[in-house]
Amino acid sequence: MSAPTLSEIWIYPIKSLDGVRVQQSGFAPGGSLAFDRRWGLFAENGAVVNAKREPRIHQIRSTFAADFSTVTLSAAGQLAATFPLADLTGFAQWLTGFFGQPIEVREESQVGFPDDLDSPGPTLISRASLVEIASWFPELSAEDLQRRLRANLVIDGLHAFGEDQLFGPSGTRVPFRIGDVAFAGINPCQRCAVPTRDPKTGDVWKRFQLEFARRREATLPAWADRSRFNHFYRAALNTVTELTNTGAKIAVGERLELEDAK
């Protein structure tokens, strides 16, 4: 394999909506990629409205200005419209019309709305892992899997599930760098209902999770710490970042390098 290299960076500005592929990214103060999951949707009772709980969210298409100052939303039965993200009123009204219930949009600029508050850094997966998992489902390509798994960082030059080398026993961190930025691998990412669905329609593949877990167990690399798999519906790496300056950035083409374990 060639030297592990960052080949794709994905930002998901509004939790559960479409991602944006970028060439470089800075970081929010809490260690997530800048603008990643910065906005979240909430029901009137305060419950999170996301793709785990509301499959209709897959039917919404979203595009963003290059500086993430505006979002354009479209969906069948709704007029496409562009909204400033500095004023969330119109955005929330559009979503309220789509879902047929009051929707509040909240902004969290420090760390965003990560699934795992203990490891809010970007999620990471090797391209070879995407290719391997796609081979379990002939209807899907590696690109389809990336849309389902929604990882932030894709690494070329690692073996399939090479990212499993970047976590250890519970309570430990595995340090590595991408360019000048220090990261630590925490644990294999637990998947939810989202990868079982078509990312454009929300249609469910009923046996996706069972087949995924079966094949993941069968192909678990020798370097993976099996104690971290209470089940095998896991793929990609959860991380934390160890930022030394507020202007830290990563960019496509930078090397991933292991550091001395802590």
Image (cartoon, helix red, strand yellow):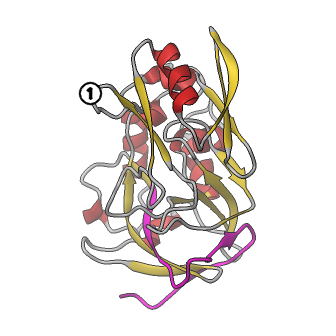
Where is 103 relative to 77, above or below?
Answer: below
Q: Which residues are magenta?
A: 236-262
Tell me the quarter of the image containing the C terminus. Answer: bottom left
Residue situated in front as seen by the camera: 249 or 101 = 101
Q: Residue at x 36, y 28 (%)?
A: 53
Where is 169 relative to 238, above or below?
Answer: below
Residue 175 lies, in percent from the top left, at: 45, 81
Q: Is residue 204 visible?
A: no
Q: Is residue 24 left or right of residue 238?
A: right
Residue density around tag 1, few if under 14, some if 14–19, many if 20 or more, within 10 Å: few
Residue 196 lies, in percent from the top left, at: 45, 31
Q: Is residue 171 visible?
A: yes
The extreme top residue here reads 77
Tell me the quarter of the image containing the N terminus. Answer: bottom right
The extreme bottom residue here reads 260
Kindly identify which residue carries mark 1: 45
Total marks in image: 1
Residue situated in front as seen by the camera: 25 or 110 = 110
Where is 77 relative to 207, above or below?
Answer: above
Amino acid type, label 1: Asn
Residue 81 lies, in percent from the top left, at: 69, 23
Q: Is residue 72 left or right of residue 37?
A: right
Q: Residue at x 56, y 29 (%)?
A: 91
Residue 114 included in the magenta stretch of the image: no
Q: Give the quarter of the image for residue 193.
A: top left
Q: Give the quarter of the image for residue 251.
A: bottom right
Q: Give the quarter of the image for residue 73.
A: top right
Q: Residue at x 50, y 79 (%)?
A: 243
Q: Secondary structure at mark 1?
A: loop
Residue 213 lies, in percent from the top left, at: 37, 43
